[in-house]
Image: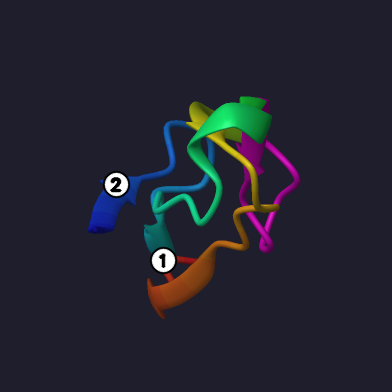
Amino acid sequence: MIQRVPCSKCGSLLQYDNASIHEGLRDFEEVICPVCGNVVGTVFTDLLPVAAVVKSEG
């Protein structure tokens, strides 16, 4: 499922997918803002969540 969150440090609106392919291989992964490097959240998934910038405030 696609999630949209604002970065608390730079204000950019980010989007990432929190889906999993293999339910048994999941772990907590950090979602990092590509603009400022701030951790905007964690996802319990087997993939590496990549945040995309929807709208940059910087």
The one of 7 and 1 positioned closer to us in this rendering: 1
Crowd tier of the residue under label 2, counting other residues whose Cα lies within 10 Å: few below 14, some 14–19, many 20 or above: some
Q: Quadrant of the N terminus?
A: bottom left
Location of residue 28 (image quadrant): top right
Kindly identify the amino acid type of the residue bearing the numbered disc 1. Glu
Of the image marks 2 and 1, the number of the one nearer the N terminus: 2
| 34 part of magenta stretch | yes
The one of 19 and 51 positioned closer to us in this rendering: 19
Name which residue lies at 75% across and 45% down: 37
Visible residue check, residue 5: yes
Name which residue lies at 60% across and 54% down: 49
Residue position for label 2: 5
Q: Is residue 35 above or below residue 29?
A: below
| 31 part of magenta stretch | yes
Crowd tier of the residue under label 1, counting other residues whose Cα lies within 10 Å: few below 14, some 14–19, many 20 or above: few
Kindly identify the amino acid type of the residue bearing the numbered disc 2. Val
On the image, the x and y values in percent for residue 43 come to 49, 31
Name which residue lies at 51% across and 73% down: 52
Residue position for label 1: 57
The secondary element bearing badge 1 is classed as loop
The secondary element bearing badge 2 is classed as strand
Which contiguous range is marked in magenta?
28-38
On the image, the x and y values in percent for residue 10 come to 51, 47
On the image, the x and y values in percent for residue 14 come to 40, 61
